[in-house]
Image (spheres, rainbow, N blue to C red):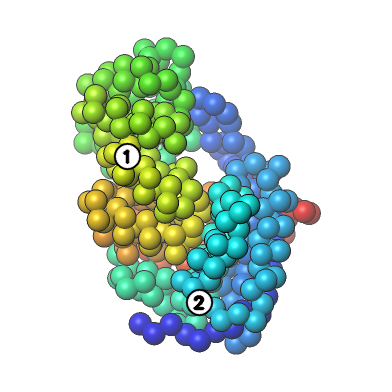
Amino acid sequence: MTLPNLTIRDVAVRAIDAPLDPPLRNSLNTISRAPLVIAELRTAEGVAGNAYVFPYTPAALGPTAALVRNIGATLAGRALAPASLWPELHNAFRILGTEGLVQIALSALDMAMWDALARAAGVPLCRLLGAEPRPLPAYASLRGWGPAILAEEAGRAVAATGARVVKFKLGHPRLEDDLATVRAVREVVGADTEILVDYNQGLTRPEAERRGRALQELDVRWLEEPLPADDDAGLAGLRAALALPVQGGENWWGPRGMARALDAGAVDLCMPDAMKIGGVTGWMQAAALAAARRVPMSSHIFVEASAQLLPATPTAHLLEHLDIAGPLLRQPLVVRDGMAEVPARPGLGLEWDEAALARFAAEV
């Protein structure tokens, strides 16, 4: 498909600080807020594209918004060509570094560019990327903590969305409590529902092996981030010791970070984050890396972008259904019978509820 010829006029930025209800809990912390930065890229031709990023903590909201605003100002008058601008912008920040908030800002702009192109073409983003919209297998990413709360939440998720796969956080001080959590969820969801677990980088190497061996006996299907995300050697050794697949990728910064981990044999499965991997352009590079190595590739949050990107991903696996922006949208992503329904709306399909944005607007 031929890309429309558009010229960037300017970039408008909005900062939102909304409650995350219910909060997202893990062994390390509780995330009770959803600070979002929304980038609206406007063109001289009147087409606008928008995207959002989630810098996790209100303390990062202002700096992220400023970076998006300041970098966006340098794009005025440029042709809207994200595949050309992506390396140029990353090279411009090479000395400072393109991880952390810089990468997050660049990804917001990249996703807004692609959204504008797809809106101008009148097609969903996945079609602009050469793929057909299709239902995607999704897993319910649970937010609670502890056996009773997670068992109840898992039951609601299965009933509401028909989820056939659920994921939840582990990392109690005692292994026995982790195993009790898995058993409690299993009792509610049944034998036909797959269970995935996430340690949020919280274990030591020996403890990861000990818990992994116990969890694989309970038919857990993946062990996510048991060690620090950059401990490639430790993760590779853990993989060799376990039959349970090791999952990772949400904390890889850009395709280079992903390539490093895959070259080291650090994971069996991967799940890049659209915000950290480099937006749409970075994701497509990541998808090519996964395809070359035949590594199944899932998504991490950002359900709207992920629903457009996974159809264009050769080794697409599962969409994580953890909806951060849903309460701020007129039409949140729908999951039925365990499948995410990719919207036919142009671009990323984002249609903001302006009243909700006004209610949670943050001054930064």
Q: Position of residue 276 (x, y in %)?
A: 50, 51
Q: Amino acid at mark 1?
A: Ala
Report which residue position mark 1 lands on.
264
**Upstream in sequence: badge 1 or badge 2:** 2
Work out how far the residue at label 1 is from the one at label 2, CA to CA, in angstroms.
33 Å
The residue lying at 40 percent from left, 67 percent from top is: 343
- Asked if disc 1 and disc 2 are in contact, CB closer than 8 Å, the reply is no
User: Is the residue 119 above or below the residue 277 in the image?
Assistant: below
The residue lying at 42 percent from left, 12 percent from top is: 174
In the image: residue 8, left or right of residue 180: right
In the image: residue 346, left or right of residue 167: right
The residue lying at 39 percent from left, 48 percent from top is: 258
User: Is the residue 331 above or below the residue 271 in the image?
Assistant: below
Is there any visible trace of residue 189 in the rendered image? Answer: no
**The quarter of the displayed image where residue 77 is located:** bottom right
Q: How many numbered discs?
A: 2
Q: Which mark is residue 315?
A: none
